[in-house]
Image (tube, rainbow, N blue to C red):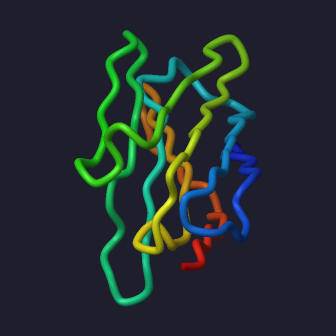
C-alpha cells in the first residue's frame, strides 16, 4: 500500500510564499514522475508542476517563473516552492505520483491566498 504524506499549505497574503512537500512511502516501485495538481472551487483539477525521473520539469503557464518543483529521489519526496502567490492560486493542492504500474494521489492540502 502506498501512502502520500503532504505537508505545508495554509493562508498567506498575496505576494507571499509557501512551500509544500509530499513524501511517498510503502510498496512503491520505480517512480516515473512526481508532481502537484490543484483544484479551485468550481473548476477542474489542473496540473501545477511535475518532475520526471530524468529531471525534466513541466509547469503550468500560470505558475512559470513563480513556482519551483524539486525532488529528493532517495526519499521519494517532492517539493513545491511557491512564490509571488496570487489570489488565483487559491485551491486544494494534491500530490501525484506515478510509478511503473500505478498512479497515486494525496488527500490534498488547502492553499489560500488573501488579496
Q: For the point 75% across and 47% down, which residue is it?
A: 5
In the rendered structure, the answer to whether residue 76 lies left or right of residue 92 reads: right
**Would you identify the image quadrant in which residue 75 lies?**
top right
Q: For the point 64% across and 69% down, which residue is it?
A: 13
Name the image quarter holding the C terminus: bottom right
Q: Is residue 105 above or below residue 108?
A: above
Residue 58 point in image, percent of width and height? 30, 33
* Count of marks, rendered view: 0
Q: For the point 62% across and 34% down, which residue is it?
A: 79
**Would you identify the image quadrant in which residue 74 lies?**
top right
Q: Nearer the viewer, residue 68 or 79?
A: 68
Name the image quarter holding the N terminus: top right
Q: For the point 51% across and 73% down, which residue is it?
A: 90
Q: Nearer the viewer, residue 25 or 112?
A: 112
Q: Is residue 90 above or below residue 75?
A: below
Q: Is residue 13 above or below residue 2?
A: below
Q: Nearer the viewer, residue 51 or 112?
A: 112
Residue 99 point in image, percent of width and height? 46, 29
Q: Residue furthest left?
A: 61
Residue 12 point in image, percent of width and height? 68, 67
Q: Is residue 66 above or below residue 68?
A: below
Q: Residue furthest bottom?
A: 42
Residue 40 point in image, percent of width and height? 43, 78
Amino acid at each position: 500500500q502506498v501512502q502520500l504524506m503532504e505537508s505545508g499549505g495554509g493562508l498567506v497574503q498575496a505576494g507571499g510564499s509557501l512551500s509544500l512537500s509530499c513524501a511517498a512511502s510503502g510498496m512503491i516501485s520505480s517512480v516515473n514522475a512526481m508532481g502537484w495538481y490543484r483544484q479551485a472551487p468550481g473548476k477542474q483539477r489542473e496540473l501545477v508542476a511535475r518532475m520526471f525521473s530524468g529531471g525534466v520539469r513541466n509547469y503550468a503557464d500560470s505558475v512559470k517563473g513563480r513556482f519551483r518543483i524539486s525532488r529528493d529521489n532517495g526519499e521519494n519526496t517532492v517539493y513545491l516552492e511557491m512564490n509571488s502567490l496570487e489570489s488565483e492560486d487559491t485551491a486544494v493542492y494534491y500530490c501525484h505520483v506515478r510509478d511503473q504500474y500505478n498512479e497515486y494521489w494525496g488527500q490534498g492540502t488547502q492553499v489560500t491566498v488573501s488579496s
